[in-house]
Image: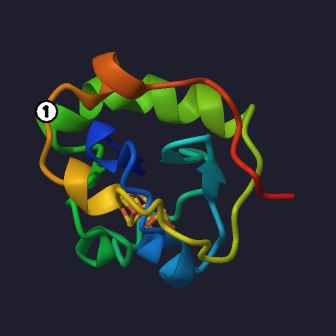
């Protein structure tokens, strides 16, 4: 069991989730975060903290198609343990549909 980040995170990246995760299992891409499925302890603390409701438990049918993406990129992107600055246009993209097709990039984020 794990929680997964879905496309609602793309271009939002408020990072409130990072602050609360007890095991620091978030990884940062250029415009979204993912959760490492093998590190997540399934505590669920991050889910209600996410403003665009981008985080789902893998028991949710919607989570299925994002699980592989979380797994793949958590092995390529840097670990993020502290909340950074959200993009200035984050609110503009809140609730927007098909963000994966429009904006996803495999580029890593800025964390060390
Ligand atoms: S709080 Fe939600 S939208 Fe923000 S970075 Fe975390 S998962 Fe993404
Ligand atoms: S469910 Fe818990 S362990 Fe998993 S990513 Fe969220 S806060 Fe971290």
Residue 62 is left or right of residue 63, and the answer is left
**Quadrant, the C terminus:** bottom right
Q: Can see residue 1?
A: no
Ligand 1 quarter of the rendering: bottom left
Tell me what residue is drawn at x 21 percent, y 60 percent: 52
Please identify the quarter of the rendering in which residue 44 is found.
bottom left
**In the rendered picture of this protein, how many numbered marks are placed on residues?**
1
Tell me what residue is drawn at x 74 percent, y 55 percent: 79
Tell me what residue is drawn at x 64 percent, y 72 percent: 23
Percent position (x, y) of residue 90?
A: 34, 58
Percent position (x, y) of residue 67?
A: 40, 31
Q: Which one is nearer the viewer's eye here, 4 or 12? A: 12
Tell me what residue is drawn at x 29 percent, y 43 percent: 58
Badge 1 element: loop
Percent position (x, y) of residue 16?
A: 43, 76
Percent position (x, y) of residue 35?
A: 53, 50
Residue 70 is left or right of residue 103, and the answer is right
Q: Which one is nearer the viewer's eye here, 17 or 94? A: 94
């Amino acid at each position: 069991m794990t929680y997964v980040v879905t496309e609602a995170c793309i271009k939002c990246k408020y990072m409130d989730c990072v602050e609360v995760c007890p095991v620091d299992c978030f990884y940062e891409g250029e415009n979204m975060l993912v959760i490492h499925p093998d590190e997540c302890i399934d505590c669920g603390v991050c889910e209600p903290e996410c403003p665009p409701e981008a985080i789902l438990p893998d028991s949710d049918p919607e989570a299925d198609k994002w699980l592989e993406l979380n797994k793949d990129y958590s092995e390529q992107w840097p670990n993020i343990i502290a909340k950074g600055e959200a993009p200035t246009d984050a609110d503009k993209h809140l609730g927007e549909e098909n963000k994966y097709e429009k904006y996803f990039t495999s580029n890593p984020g800025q964390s060390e």
